[in-house]
């Protein structure tokens, strides 16, 4: 049986950060991943350009049943720490909007810098290598792997969640957590498009590809971003964001006129353009196709002068507070993250060590910490991986 200081399972963002930082401390690090290449989610992120952090990442940008847990790690490894690493490797980047930092070229630039750092400090990386079991031993842990049995003083679980199974996502990390006595909070897809049914689905399908600025609200949370109509329902950044706070059966309220008081604007149009049809008025703020479809779908378009005050108020309510009850979500197939996971109350917020089994660590998405859209989940991967690496 070979032995090493640290075995890290999962060569994604958190695992790579943990590996390179621990090895830099002089630790003997073995990094294993069952997929055929490291960092698959890094490569596909940000439309292939990797939204690698957010300049404004703070604890408020993360959802967890234990909201204080993320504070320590985020404070100790900031977005600017990772930006420094990006600059060190000469990777060009830009702010897209709202503090979101993207590569100028390809996501591969971020993966390559992580792999280069790992190589420079002697991390031993094996892909296409499964871990079949982990057992507690007198001096740490014994792992049964495709490389044979491995002994390690510390084991780090960096296997992510259930999102995008085509990239190799499994419930392995949750299984290990349960094996060693941890509570795994219920999981579900987050940052995921909504599906719709009935007439709403027909409307969405007809508007497929149309994007519009909006404010989406649900369960006390709100996000201003774009909404995208799809053949299956609703997507776009605003919808992905609010999906993490939605539960089946909940209503999502969407303001399609975020820069206007809908009623005030319609009353003004009613006075100024009495002979114009509603669809013509709406085409001032939406595409002609969207204006026409909304007018017909909701209101039976007619000249503005024919709308009485109650009808105008009903139109304003629909535009300013469109109430949608999604049929569901597209699920883990397209979800960017997994909500829920290993209960952080059973993990040290400083070291990420299990309170149930010393020498066992959990980092990244496998934990019940989920960031908003916009680079926050990568920042959590960097911060949690870096924190655990200080002590493994």
Image (cartoon, rainbow, N blue to C red):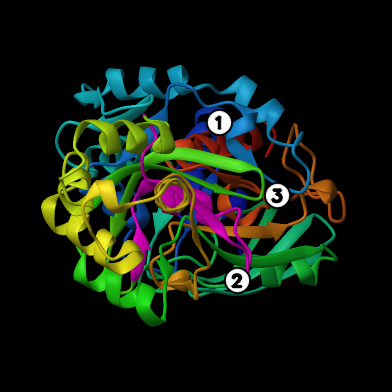
In front: mark 1 or mark 2?
A: 2
- Name the spot of residue 136 as percent of width and height, x first: 80, 65
Is 369 or 124 nearer to us in this picture?
Answer: 369
Is residue 373 shown above or below 202? above
The magenta segment is 233-259
**Quarter of the image that includes the C terminus:** top right
**Quarter of the image that includes the N terminus:** bottom right
User: Which residue matches tag 1?
Assistant: 26
User: Which residue matches tag 3?
Assistant: 361
Mark 3 crowdedness (10 Å alpha carbons): few <14, some 14-19, many ≥20: many
- Name the spot of residue 286 as percent of width and height, x first: 20, 46
Residue at disc 1, secondary structure? loop
Residue in the picture at 58% in, 61% down: 251
Mark 2 crowdedness (10 Å alpha carbons): few <14, some 14-19, many ≥20: some
Q: Confirm whether residue 121 shows in the render.
A: no
Q: Which callout, 1 or 3, points at the residue further toward the start of the chain?
A: 1
- Taking the image as shown, residue 171 lies to the left or right of residue 115, namely right
């Amino acid at each position: 049986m070979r032995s090493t200081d640290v075995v890290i399972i999962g060569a994604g963002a958190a695992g790579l950060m943990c590996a390179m930082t621990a090895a830099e401390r002089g630790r003997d690090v073995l990094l294993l991943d069952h997929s055929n290449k490291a960092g698959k989610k890094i490569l596909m992120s940000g439309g292939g350009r990797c939204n690698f952090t957010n300049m404004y990442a703070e604890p408020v940008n993360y959802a967890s049943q234990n909201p204080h847990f993320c504070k320590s790690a985020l404070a100790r490894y900031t977005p600017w720490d990772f930006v420094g690493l990006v600059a060190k490797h000469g990777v060009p980047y830009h702010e897209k909007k709202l503090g979101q930092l993207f590569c100028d070229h390809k996501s591969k630039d971020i993966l390559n810098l992580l792999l280069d750092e790992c190589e420079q400090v002697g991390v031993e990386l094996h892909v296409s290598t499964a871990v079949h079991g982990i057992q507690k031993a007198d001096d740490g842990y014994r792992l049964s792997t495709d490389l044979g049995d491995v002994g390690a003083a510390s084991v780090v679980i960096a296997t992510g969640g259930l999102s995008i199974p085509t990239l190799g996502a499994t419930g392995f990390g949750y299984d290990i957590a349960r094996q060693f006595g941890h509570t795994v909070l219920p999981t579900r897809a987050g940052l995921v498009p909504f599906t719709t049914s009935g007439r709403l689905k027909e409307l969405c399908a007809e508007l497929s590809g149309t994007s519009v600025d909006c404010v989406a609200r649900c369960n006390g949370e709100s996000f201003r971003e774009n909404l995208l109509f799809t053949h299956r329902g609703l997507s776009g950044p605003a919808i992905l964001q609010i999906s993490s706070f939605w539960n089946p059966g909940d209503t999502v309220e969407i303001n399609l006129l975020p820069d206007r008081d809908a009623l005030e604007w319609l009353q003004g149009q009613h006075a100024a353009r009495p002979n114009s049809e509603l669809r013509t008025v709406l085409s001032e703020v939406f595409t002609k196709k969207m204006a026409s479809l909304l007018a017909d779908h909701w209101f039976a378009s007619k000249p503005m002068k024919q709308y009485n005050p109650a009808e105008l108020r009903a139109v304003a309510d629909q535009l300013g507070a469109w109430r949608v009850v999604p049929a569901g979500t597209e699920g883990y197939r397209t979800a960017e993250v997994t909500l829920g996971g290993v209960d952080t109350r059973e993990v040290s917020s400083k070291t990420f060590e299990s309170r149930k089994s010393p020498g066992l660590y959990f980092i990244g998405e496998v934990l019940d910490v989920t960031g908003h859209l916009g680079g926050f989940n990568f920042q959590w991967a960097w911060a949690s991986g870096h924190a655990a690496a200080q002590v493994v």
